[in-house]
C-alpha cells in the first residue's frame, strides 16, 4: 500500500493512525497542502490519506546542508482512477481542514489509537 511505503520511507513505519476519505482534489488540498490549487483539476476524485506519527522528508529538495522537513502529520492525495500520488503534505500541526469534514473516514490501520 502506498501509505505504508511513504510512512516507512519518511521515518515512521508505525504511525499512530492512518485515515482515508474520498473527496475532490480541491477539497483534499485544503487539508494536505493549504493554499495550493490545481486549475482544471479541482473536481478529480481522490483519496486523501492522513497519518499521524513522526516523519522526516529526506527526499525534499533544499539547499545543501539544510535540515530535512519534519512533521507529525503527513498527507497524501491519490488519484482514484490511476492510484498515482498527486500531492504530498507534511506539517507539525493537524490539518486545518479535518478530513472528516469531506465525508466518511476509514481508518486503514490503527497502530495505537484513532482520533475521536
Image (cartoon, rainbow, N blue to C red):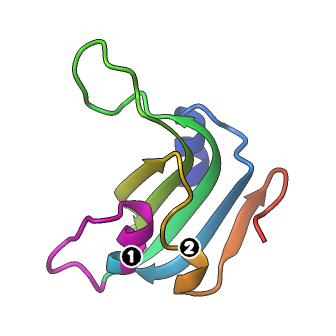
Q: Is residue 8 left or right of residue 14?
A: left
Q: Earlier in the sequence, mark 2 or mark 1?
A: 1
Q: Main secondary structure of the magenta part?
A: loop
Residue extending furthest top? 65
Q: Is residue 13 inside the magenta stretch?
A: no
Residue 101 position, x and y percent, is 56, 83
Residue 1 position, x and y percent, is 59, 54
Quadrant (top left/top right/bottom left/bottom right) for the C terminus? bottom right
Q: Which residue is mark 1?
A: 81
Which residue is drawn at the image coordinates 35% and 76% (left, top)? 25
Q: Is residue 26 left or right of residue 80?
A: left
Q: Which residues are magenta?
A: 27-43
Give whichever of 90, 107 is nearer the camera: 90
Residue extending furthest right? 112
Q: Which residue is mark 2?
A: 98
Residue 5 position, x and y percent, is 56, 43
Which residue is drawn at the image coordinates 64% and 85% (left, top)? 104
The quadrant holding residue 66 is: top left
Secondary element type, mark 2: loop
Which circle marks residue 39 in the picture?
none
Amino acid at each position: 500500500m502506498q501509505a505504508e511505503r511513504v510512512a516507512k520511507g519518511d521515518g515512521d513505519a508505525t504511525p499512530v493512525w492512518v485515515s482515508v476519505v474520498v473527496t475532490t482534489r480541491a477539497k483534499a488540498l485544503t487539508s494536505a497542502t493549504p493554499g495550493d490549487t490545481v486549475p482544471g483539476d479541482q473536481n478529480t476524485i481522490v483519496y486523501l490519506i492522513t497519518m499521524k506519527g513522526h516523519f522526516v522528508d529526506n527526499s525534499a529538495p533544499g539547499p545543501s546542508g539544510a535540515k530535512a522537513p519534519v512533521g507529525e502529520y503527513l498527507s497524501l492525495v491519490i488519484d482514484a482512477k490511476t492510484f498515482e500520488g498527486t500531492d504530498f503534505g507534511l506539517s507539525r500541526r493537524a490539518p486545518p481542514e479535518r478530513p472528516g469534514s469531506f465525508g466518511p473516514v476509514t481508518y486503514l490501520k490503527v497502530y495505537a489509537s484513532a482520533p475521536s
